[in-house]
Amino acid sequence: MDLPLFYAKDIAPGTATYTMDEPTSKHCIMVLRKQKGEQVLLADGRGNKFTAVIADDNRKKCVLQVTACENVPAPTPAIRIAICFTKNASRIEWFLEKATEIGIQEIIPVLSHRSETEKFKAERLQNILVSAMMQSQQYYLPVLEAPVAFDKVVKQSKDSQRFIAHCLPESKTHLWQAMQPGKDTLVLIGPEGDFTPAEIALALEQGFQAVSLGDTRLRTETAGMVAATMCKCANVAG
């Protein structure tokens, strides 16, 4: 059976003992019913994996004896999704959870002409990422950027391949066919109502390639997941 994994943001390599905060201690001791002498795993979200033994099973301040630390190689290539937030906050929260589970490295909330600008609750969203990272037994926490203006995203991106998914009726390559495995990738996903023609034109001027995600019109969060999944699968297949 896999050992339970807990997030320890403030732990560092070389730490000999570590005390869990109260919520984590309660979950470990009261919910999972772990006891003194049992092993657990810790992740700092930066690739470090710690093996530890419960030295004091206090439900408010569980003390661990760290027995080993190893660095897990970062997944490559980097996959970044720049996505406009939706009016329904639960939908974008669902996207963040699932994107973390499949191993996306960075998520950029985009402020476009038609996007929602009042739904960014940093602490809540960060907690969703942490929970998804632990559930999926990963050791890298995706970077969640602060909201960034559309023009800044398209002008400053240095990724090897850059795509913009949109719904305008013009010639586009399917993302699956456009993807080249092994290259850092950024995919732009538009808001409800899509990017404006001016935004699409700006992205194309900056070297983005227009792509399709299929024959049906997708909701923003669904489009984000389709793009993330295709990028991951293309690199596995490649």
Image (tube, rainbow, N blue to C red):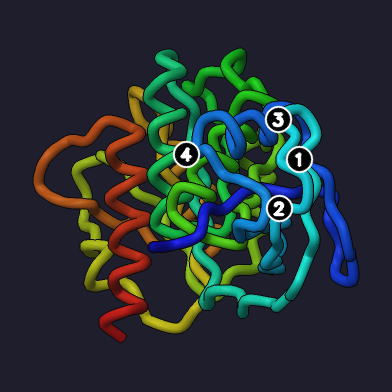
Q: Amino acid at mark 1?
A: Cys
Q: Earlier in the sequence, mark 4 or mark 1?
A: 1
> Is mark 1 in CB contact (under 8 Å) with mark 2?
yes
Q: Callout 3, which amino acid?
A: Arg
On-image quarter of the N terminus: bottom left
* Element type at mark 4: helix
**Rendered view: 108 above or below 45:** above
Q: Residue at x 37, y 80 (%)?
A: 180
Residue that lies at the very extreme toward the left in this rendered image:
215
Mark 3 and mark 1 residues within 8 Å of each other at the beta carbon: yes
Question: How far apart are the alpha carbons under marks 3 and 1?
Answer: 6 Å
Q: Which residue is mark 2?
A: 54
Which amino acid lies under the numbered mark 2 shown in the image of this protein? Answer: Ile
Q: Residue furthest front?
A: 36
Residue count near mark 1 (Cα–Cα under 10 Å), binned few <14, some 14–19, many ≥20: many
* In this rendering, the label closer to the viewer, 4 or 1: 1
Q: In the rendered structure, which amino acid carries the disc numbered 4?
A: Leu
Q: Residue at x 64, y 29 (%)?
A: 26
Residue 208 seen in the figure = no
Residue tagged 1: 62
Residue designated by label 3? 59
